Amino acid sequence: MPSSAPADSGSSASSLEAAAFRSLEPEGALGKFGMWEARGSRACKKNPGELDSALQFRAIIVPVKVQIFGQIYSIRGELEEKYVQRLAKFVDEKMHAIAESTGIVDTQKLAVLAALAIADELHSLKTEVTDEEHMLREQAERCLTLVERALKQTA
């Protein structure tokens, strides 16, 4: 998604951060992260009235402070604090691994590459699960056929 912030490494952190949040907020895609804010960003949503009407949240929980690639974020939502911290640690580690292997320093580019890498992992796992479900279904059908044959022979 194109961003209005410059992509060079000399961009200010707040403009990169604001651009990253604009690009990370497709309509209705906040999921269980109902409220979020990034310290120092003008792209924050702090007021429930500012949220899309399609998004309904049962509770607004005390913000969880996390650090991702040197930037502090305050995340509010329905997820447990420890889980949000684990997610943030996972994203942080992914961004650092990509930065080390590519030499890229632009935070926005690293965030996009990390998102793509995580999406690839998710897609691969979903495909693997689907394949395993298919294999188990075939095995169950074979077992059912064997049981039916055995029952016919004993009848």
Image: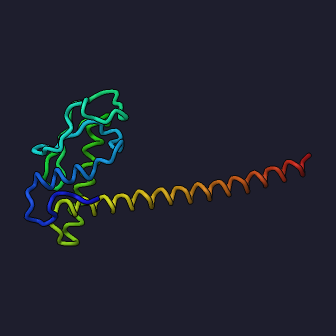
The answer to which quarter of the image holds residue 9 is bottom left
In this image, 15 relative to 82: left or right? Answer: left
Above or below, 8 relative to 149:
below
Identify the residue shown where x is 34% and y is 38%.
32
Q: Position of residue 53 (x, y in %)?
A: 34, 32
In the image, residue 152 lies at what x, y percent? 89, 49
- Quarter-wise, where is residue 84 in the image? top left
Q: Position of residue 27 (x, y in %)?
A: 34, 44
> Extreme right residue here?
155
| Coloring applied to the structure | rainbow
Vertical position of residue 127 compared to residue 66: above or below: below
- Percent across and percent down for residue 130 are 55, 56
Which residue is at the far top?
59
Q: Residue at x 90, y 52 (%)?
A: 153
In the depicted view, which residue is nearer to us: 103 or 40?
40
Q: 153 above or below 60?
A: below
Task: Look at 15% across and 56% down and name the residue there.
Answer: 16
Query: Where on the picture, by quarter, is residue 138?
Result: bottom right
Q: Is residue 152 left or right of residue 110?
A: right
Residue at 92% from the left image edge and 46% from the top image edge: 155
Report the number of discs.
Answer: 0
Q: Considering the image in quadrants, where does the N terminus appear? A: bottom left
